[in-house]
Image: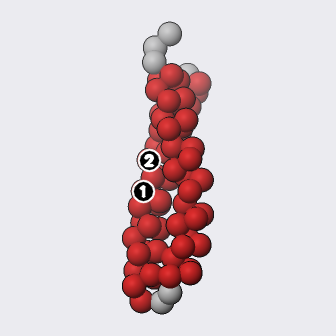
Amino acid sequence: MPNSDLLPSLLFKINENQLALEAAILELSNWIEQHAGEEVADNVRGALVAIDRNEEFIKLTLAVMMTPE
């Protein structure tokens, strides 16, 4: 398999990792909100907005890259 064929699979796995990290960080922000403070939790959730904002573009681009020519 040529290296160029590995790129879409690699990007797909990186995206999966990113989404898993997002979920874990969101869980932590919920815990922080309940035990420490709402301000910190809001800051964490604000940082996660970039992941949400880019998720659809990443999914669509990966789908295009993984489609046979």
Q: Is residue 28 left or right of residue 47?
A: left
Where residue 39 appears, as percent x and y from the top left, is 56, 81
- Looking at the image, which is closer to me, 41 or 9? 41
Report how far apart the C-alphas of labels 1 and 2 lie in the structure: 6 Å
- Kindly identify the amino acid type of the residue bearing the numbered disc 2: Glu
Residue at screen point 59% across, 72% down: 43
Q: Secondary structure at mark 2?
A: helix
Query: Which label is found at residue 60?
Result: none
Residue bearing mark 1 = 20
Residue bearing mark 2 = 16
The answer to whether residue 24 is seen in the rendering is yes
Residue at screen point 54% across, 73% down: 42
Q: Is residue 38 above or below residue 68?
A: below
Q: Hey, which quadrant is residue 33 in on the image? A: bottom left
Where residue 18 appears, as percent x and y from the top left, is 50, 53
Where residue 3 appears, as percent x and y from the top left, is 58, 27
Where residue 22 appears, as percent x and y from the top left, is 47, 59
Q: Is residue 35 above or below residue 12?
A: below
Q: Is residue 4 above or below residue 49?
A: above
The answer to whether residue 6 is seen in the rendering is no
Q: How is the image coloured?
A: secondary structure
- Looking at the image, which is closer to me, 61 or 65? 61
How many C-alpha atoms fall within 10 Å of the one at disc 2: few (<14), some, or many (≥20)?
few
- Label pair 1/2, CB-CB below 8 angstroms: yes
- Kindly identify the amino acid type of the residue bearing the numbered disc 1: Ala
**Residue closest to the far top:** 69
Residue at screen point 44% across, 67% down: 26
Q: Secondary structure at mark 1?
A: helix
**Residue closest to the far bottom:** 36
